[in-house]
Image: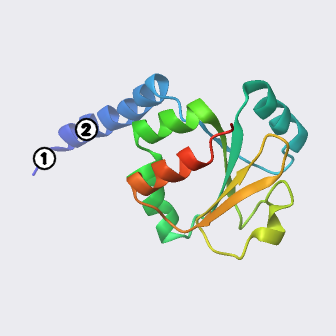
Amino acid sequence: NISSEEATNLAYYFLDYNKQRELKHPKPIKVLESGYDEKKILNDAKTQNKSIIVYATSKSCYFCKKMKSEVLDLDEIEDKIEKDFIFLEVDVDFIALPYDLKKSFYGMTPTFFFVSNEGKLMNTYPGAWIKSDFIQILEENINK
């Protein structure tokens, strides 16, 4: 058992830890909200010579949460995404998929869409992946 003061101190520690971690390792994920600008995102992708990953997710999706905690939140994965991609997270329960991806989406979350910096769908990967498989998927889709 811990005292109330110790519990409070732990809470402050963990809250500050997350803030400090985010400062040192900013996440390369942009969460799309309504009113996003597809043309601006494409322009950024062209300027940076990157492809786009559109991550179709849902707050109620168990495998999305598992994928995020076990793969997407890893520093190695974040670094690989930041280097070669613009990563867009889209909660499909509330926001429409960009780049006319709706016609290629079969309602399964998570689904990863790889889009060229010209807005063309290159590949679709439904499902959650282990780290090594996701690294291979990233490497297959680097803008060449």
Could you say whether the residue bearing mark 1 is in a helix, strand or loop? loop
| In contact (CB < 8 Å): disc 2 and disc 1 | yes
Residue on which disc 2 sits: 10
Q: Position of residue 115 (x, y in %)?
A: 75, 50
Residue 17 vs residue 27: left or right?
Answer: left
**Nearer to us in this view, 51 or 26:** 51
Which residue shows up at 42% across the image and 51% down it? 71
Badge 2 or badge 1: first in the primary sequence: 1
Residue 2 vs residue 104: left or right?
Answer: left
Amino acid beneath label 2: Leu
* Residue 95 against residue 142 in the figure, above or below: below
Residue on which disc 1 sits: 2
Which residue shows up at 90% across the image and 39% down it? 39
Which residue shows up at 54% across the image and 70% down it? 61
Residue 55, image quadrant: bottom right
Residue 52, image quadrant: top right
Q: How many marks?
A: 2
Q: Position of residue 6 (x, y in %)?
A: 18, 38
Tell me the tag on residue 109: none
**Nearer to us in this view, 69 or 137:** 137
Q: Among all residues in the image, which is located at the extreme left?
A: 1
Q: Position of residue 139 (x, y in %)?
A: 54, 44
Q: Quadrant of the C terminus?
A: top right
* Residue 68 against residue 59 in the figure, above or below: above
